[in-house]
Each structure stands twice: as C-alpha cells, then as structure tokens.
Amino acid sequence: MSRIVNHAPWLVVAVLGAFSLGTVALARGETINALWLVVAAVCTYLVSYRYYSLFIAKRVMRLDPDRPTPAARHNDGLDYVPTNQYVLFGHHFAAIAGAGPLVGPVLAAQMGYLPGMLWILAGVVIAGAVQDFMILFISMRRDGRSLGELIKSELGAVPGVIALFGTFMIMVIILAVLALVVVKALTNSPWGFFTVAATVPIALFMGLYMRFIRPGRIGEISVIGFFLLIAAILLGGQVAQSETLAPLFTLTGIQITWILIGYGFVASVLPVWLLLAPRDYLSTFLKVGTIVVLALCILLVAPPMKMPSMTRFIDGTGPVWSGSLFPFLFITIACGAVSGFHALISSGTTPKMVENELQARFIGYGGMLTESFVAIMALVAASCIEPGVYFAMNSPPAVLGSTAEAAAQVINNWGFVITPEMITQTAKDVGEVSILSRAGGAPTLAVGMSQIFSELFGGKSMMAFWYHFAILFEALFILTAVDAGTRAGRFMLQDLLGVFFKPLQQTASWAGNLIATGLCVAAWGYILYQGVVDPLGGINTFWPLFGISNQMLAGIALILATVVLFKMKRERYAWVTMVPAAWLLICTLTAGVQKVFHSNPAIGFLAHADRFRTAADEGRLLAPAKSMEQMRQVIFNDYLDAGLSALFVLVVLAVLGFAVRTCLQALQSDRPTAREIPATGVVAEAGD
Amino acid sequence: MERMKSNLSRFRGYFEQTAKLMVGVPDYDTYVEHMRVQHPDQPVMTYREFLDNRLEARYGAGKAGCC
C-alpha cells in the first residue's frame, strides 16, 4: 500500500506531462502558449529522473555509496576534492552549457517547434543524459581518467589514437562554426562589433587588476567587469548613432574573419591570467545568470508560440539548412538532446570531485536534463518571434536577395505573412541596419530574448539594449571557447605531432607553441573563411558537419559505455547504451554518407563539386566565385569537406569494429574483465 | 533568528563556492585544512599561488573546451 502512495505524486506528474505534450502535439493551426512546452518538458525530466536514472544507478551501474571515489582516495585539496553535490552540479552544468544548446534548436525551428521539441525530450532521456551519466560513472571508477584514456584502456591503443584524432577534428570544426556564429552576428553591426570588441580591453583591465591591484578577488572584479560590460553596450548604442565612429566599427564578414583569426592566435599565446581567465569569469557568470533570468522571464511572460508546430520544410527543402527531417534534424540539434562533447567534461574535472558515488546520478543525469531545458528555452525564444522575421533572419542571401522587399516576397511565397516594413521595423527596433540573413542562431535568439525581456523590463525602447545584451552574452562565451579551444587544440596537436617529431611535444618551447597554435588557428580559420564567403551562408554547409562530428563522438562514448557493460558481465542491461548508440550511428552514418554522395548539390559535397566542375568546363562562373581561380577553390573545398565527412564515418566504423570484437571476447570470459579500480583497492597516497 | 542567520551564511558560502568552482577554483579553506591535517610537514601555498596553480590546471596541457 505504501508503495502505491509513494508513486502517486509521480503518476500526477506523468499525467500532467502527457497532457501537456498532447496539447503541444495535437495543436493544429491554433497558437499555443509556450508554457505548455515548458510544463511538458519539466514533467518529462522529473519522471525520467525519478525512474529511469534510478534504474540505471541501481541495476545497471549498481552505484555503491561505500565505495571510495577518486576524490576520497586521492584527496589533495586541488584536483581531487570531495565536493558538495550542489556545488559540483553548478560546476558541471557551467562546463557543459555553451553555444550548442542555444544554436541548434533555433536552426531546427525551421521545421516548426514540434519535431525539435520531441527530439530534445526523447534524445535527452534516452541518449544524452545516459551518456553523461555513464561516462561520469566509468571515469569515476577509474580515477577520473579522460575519455581518450578510457577508450585506450578498455578498447585498445589503436582505437584510442583514432578517437584522439577524431576529437581533434571535431574541435577544429566546432571552433570554426562557433566563430562563424559570431561573424554572422557582428557583420555590418557597429553596435554589436563595438560592444564585443570592448570586452577585450575590459578583460585585460580585469586581468591586470587581479594580478597587481587586488590579487585574487574573483567576485569583486567580476562585478566590476559586469558593469563595464553594461557600459560598453550603452556606449555601443552611441557609437552606432555617431556619423564619425559608426563607419569605423562597420565591418564586412571577411574583415571580421581576419580579426578573429588574428585574435585567436594572439589570445591563445598570451598568459592565461591576462585575457583568458578574466574573460572566462565574465562569460561563465553572464551565461549562467542569463540562462536563469531567461527561464524566469519565459515563465512570467508566457509568450505564445507564433511558429507553426510543423512547417512545410519537414520535407527537407528548408532555407536554413538542407536535408530532410531524418537524419538531419537529429544532428542539427546536438547539445540539448545528446552531445559528444559532454563525454569530455564527464571524464574531466567532475569525476575527480564527486563525494559519493550515488551523487553521480544527480550531477550526470540531472546536469544534462538541465542543459536540455536550456535547449527548450532556445526553441521557445526562436518560435515566439514572427515566423516571417525568423526566415528573414535565417535564410541565406542567395535565396532572399539583399533588400527587405525582395526578402518579403520570397518569404510570402513560402506562406509566411510578412511585409518589407515589418523587416525594416524589426531591424530598427533592435538598433541594426539590417537583420537579413543573419543565420547562426545568435541574432534570432537575441531578437526572441529581447522581445521576452523587454515585455518585463523597459518596453519597446529597451529592445535594442536587450538585443545587444543577448549578442554580447553569446559572443562572449563563444570567444572564450575559441580561445580556450585553440589552446586545447594546440596541446592535442603537439601530442599528435610529437609522435613523429619529438621536440614539438614540449609545451613549454616557444617554437613548438607557435607552430602548433598557428596550425590550429589556420585549420579553423580556413573553414571559417569558407563559411563566410559561402553564398549559402556557411551555417547551411558547416552546421551539419559539426552536428555529425559531435553526435559521432557521442556515439563513440556510448559504444565505450556498452563495451564496459559487457566487460562488467552486465550485458543484459547493455541495451541502455546500445539503443541510443545504435540510433546515433544510424543518424550520423546516414547523414555522413548523404553529405558525401547525395545527388542534391545543396546536401552532397560531391554533387556540388560536379556542378561547379561542369560550369567551369563550360567557362561559366557560379556565385560566389568571381574568377576561374575561385571556381577551382570551391571545387577543392567540396572535396575537402567530402573527405572530412568520409573520415568521420571511417573513424566511427573503426571504433565500432574494435568494440564488437571486445564485446565478443568479454562474452566468452567467465568473469568481469572491466579495468575498474577495485572497491577495496589499496588507498593510494595522493598523486600530485 | 540565530539559526536563520547561520543558514543564510551557510547558503552564501555554498553560493560562493559554486561560483568559484564554475571558473575552476576550488575552495581554498578546504585545501588549507587538507594540508594541515594530511601533510603538516609540507609548505602550504598562499591564496595567490593557489590561484595560479588552478589557472595552470584549468588551461594548461590536456584540457578540452565545452560546446
């Protein structure tokens, strides 16, 4: 009887969730309120956390509260510190939340909010949160070792190197795509560019202040920095109005690209305390703070969803990104549903600080559920602006043309009502000259956020301020990621290259540093540049590539988890990781193969190359190429992109092959072969 | 009242710890306490050295970014 009573409240939550989900799913034509999505999402999270994550913790992992965690065994007060679970949750969440869950859902909104929402919810419960939780568990049982090391020790040295190489490639693509988002947001936007550029002197000031004036006062300097940021936004508004200053900060995409490349290089060789660390403080606190405020605002404003629940573009003809719902929706929304990058975080700092094994459930599974909620909020923000405005902002110039009149006509033909005045008025409201073709998520999200925020604070006159606040918020943490990522990429590259040429491996040597940094910046800078000159807007081409690589990394992480379950002789529960791994492999391999071989030039790189080759043979020029030289460049890039996609597919297939072999060996063994640190293992003295 | 006050200060302590750990700085007092109890014979880093040490750990070799 008491068991029934215990479950009764959860039944209520489940019914409420199902009802909300039904309301969202069955709405046809009529506008529904965003709160239905929020309630449906939260109920789904609660029920899955209460039942599914508990099942995984108890049955699949058999978490043991008495087993010493790495923090307990190696406690050194520095890397390994038993930490309160709420404190650690905050750290873990701040580490996994980034641009991913904000950009993907905005792009996916072109199919309407329903497909994206269903994938975010199903994906997080079955795949994303399971991956984060499992990798945290696996790493926690192995002294907090990293994903690469885990693959190496459980699968073998060769798959270890393959995975390391794959991770590096993913890093390059992620940096290029994130930088592209910034370029798209700041092109011809003096206000935006000034504000974001101002963060560099602000961060330098903070760094010097922390170093020489008041050492170590993180809280104090972060508050000062925050007020300086707000001042920079306000000043940016003045700059944009000034006739003499505005042209100085009105830059083309290509100019911004070169500035970013130069910045990335300089920033990642400067001492960390000077620029990177202080900007990291600002971006982290601003990110978490804005996410919390956005959640509260959505609850208070309860905006109606203006985007249809499903648009005609589920057939794959959408302007924002190309490709049909399957498989491309599932790679467009990566973080928020499932993200391979979290496997790196879950095998990074977090496992070294868990106080008690049981808490891994709250931090791993719960952290990812929270991240998923951020994705739902991004979807709401993108869907509560006028669909016509959404498509004006996210369709490439090759489709829309360059004037508000031309764009309005194209969008009206798609069946979304919009007038040229609405487009120019929206641009005016947010203090920009034009909002056309600003794909990449950040500007769209900024318009949505400025609409929601300005309803509560300041009304329409504040929209421009909130818009640039939102742009700053995203640009800031993207730049931090670019800077930190270049640094991390440099170390990875030095590791990889060191295999062939030893001296490069010394991370303290200046020559080695500069060469590796240069290579790393050149790699993402090259892709970024291609994205900026692409007439389809870059995002169209490169976001899928990012999604494929990120989801493939998730696939690899889940394959590792499956292998570990087999080696623990718990194969009867291996479906927990096999089902999501299989789904991710189906999606990413299909998408990867389609990106190479699809006959539609908008999707398949080879078809695109063919089109340009045919034109070149006939002596014709196709946009964006302005000369035969550039035509050949486009063709070369197509082959390069096709090669990358193919490479990713091969990496995953190779890891899968090794995994199947290891699982079969584990099945034949009559005892567990997983390489865990034994529960009663000798307590090692703190390793430094 | 007293109890509420102590609850509040404890909450503030957690808030500060969380914010600091978000940017990669664990609790300094915990570190000092650990050194005092476990390694009384070894020198303890000052807060500034501790921060530098953590900075190097966060951005030094072998760290990955976020998404």
Image (cartoon, coloured by chain):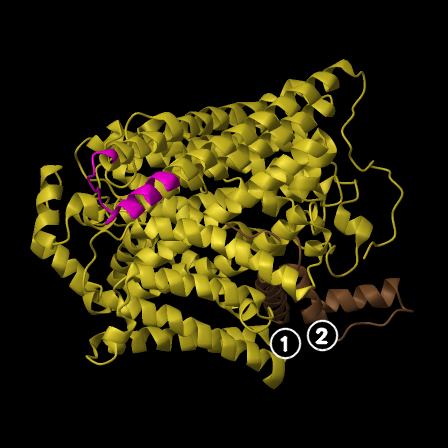
Chain colours: A yellow, B brown
Residue A631 counted in the magenta span: yes
Question: Which amino acid does the dot numbered 1 rest on?
Answer: Gly
Residues tagged 2 and 1 counted as in contact (Cβ below 8 A): yes
Which quadrant is the C terminus of chain A positioned in? bottom right
Secondary structure at numbered mark 1:
loop
Residue ID at (41%, 55%)? A179
Q: CA distance from mark 2 to mark 1?
A: 7 Å
In the rendered image, is residue A19 in sight? no
Name of the residue lying farthest toward the right: B41
- Which quadrant of the rendered structure holds the N terminus of chain A? top right
Rendered image quadrant of residue B13: bottom right
Is residue A257 rendered to the left or right of residue A309? right
Outermost residue toward the top? Answer: A668
Residue receiving disc 2: B47
Q: Residue furthest bottom?
A: A213
The residue segment tinted magenta is: A617-637
Q: Chain of mark 2?
A: B
Relative to the observer, which residue lies in front, A327 or A658?
Answer: A658
Residue A679, compared with residue A671, is above or below; it is: below
Q: Position of residue A273 (x, y in %)?
A: 60, 72
Which x, y percent locates residue A390?
Answer: 22, 47
**Left of A276 or right of it: where is A352?**
right
Callout 2: helix, strand or loop?
A: helix
Q: Position of residue A606 (x, y in %)?
A: 35, 30
The one nearer the camera, A401 or A214, is: A401
Tag 1 subunit: A
Q: Callout 2, which amino acid?
A: Tyr
Q: How many numbered badges does the structure rendering display?
A: 2
Residue A507 lies in the magenta stretch: no
Residue A506: x %, y % from top left: 71, 58
Mark number, residue A216: 1
Characterize the local packing of mark 2: few (<14), some (14-19) or many (20 or more) Cα atoms within 10 angstroms. some
